Image (cartoon, rainbow, N blue to C red):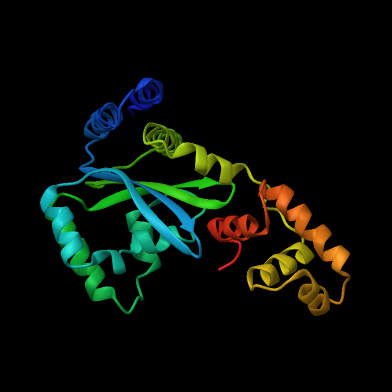
Amino acid sequence: MNIHSILQLLVLVNEAKTQAEVAAELDKLLRAYGFVGYDIWLFHRADSTRSEMLLMDNWPESWRTLYATRKYSLVDPARRMLSSAQRPFRWRDAIHAFRDDPYRKRVLKLLQDASRFNMVDGYVFPIFGKTGLIGQLNISGPSIELSPVEISLFETAGRRIFWRLLELQGLAPELELCDSLDTDLTKRQMEVLILLADGMTSNEIAKELSISNHTVDWYINVIQEKFNAKNRQHVIAIAFRLGLIT
């Protein structure tokens, strides 16, 4: 096991001053294990749409082109399993989960093409924040057996690298703000929020929910305080960003 190498990475990532330094340390660790490539993604919501941003990757150039040209992202079982995963998983686990998938032939073609680059298996490490899934570290190569301790350390490393990249790119403050917000709303607060997002006034919400205008305003003020929002429009914008409403 290369546990010492992972622990060393955690220290060096904190000291890295540039993205290139972070990439160099991660490349060194993955090469020591025999992995071929990786990518690290940021997931966030802007208005009602979830967007994805590639923070850093290192794949064989021909594979990157092939993957995009053949639109494998649409059938990639690892990407599809990520949306429901609660812990790290292997590529082969995702392949098994979608064994009866109608796109099975395309998935098999994807695996066949990946194997040409010595990528026959891999690990996906979801990165969670208070608002849910916010990123991932995906690594691949030959079939490599990681111990439970190594998987746990890789998960920690993935999260540390993820946040360090955000810090270096100036993206951390906004994500940390969203991650620190109190999004634990009551059923009634959610009802008010949804109607507010639909464009209703306090009077209209009051009639819809059979409560007083004063009570509606009180609920909105509570939500506004939880979100650290400046006004009602800001409340709605934050709710969309957090995925509370669509």
Going by the image, does 7 lie left or right of 209?
Answer: left
Which residue is nearer to you in this view: 96 or 17? 17
What percent of the width, then of the height, locates residue 19? 30, 31
Quadrant in the picture for residue 204 = bottom right
Residue 217 appears anywhere in the view: yes
Instruction: Identify the residue shown where x is 56% and y is 61%.
Output: 240
Going by the image, does 224 lie left or right of 59?
Answer: right
What percent of the width, then of the height, locates residue 189? 76, 62
Instruction: Identify the residue shown where x is 71% and y is 48%.
Output: 226
Instruction: Identify the residue shown where x is 24% and y is 33%.
Output: 27
Which residue is nearer to you in this view: 6 or 137? 137
Q: Quadrant of the C terminus?
A: bottom right
Q: Is residue 237 above or below residue 169?
A: below
Going by the image, does 50 lie left or right of 108?
Answer: right
Q: Is residue 87 above or below residue 96?
A: above
What percent of the width, then of the height, locates residue 4? 36, 22
Q: Is residue 119 above or below residue 156?
A: below
What percent of the width, then of the height, locates residue 47? 50, 62
Q: Quadrant of the N terminus?
A: top left
Residue 75 appears anywhere in the view: no
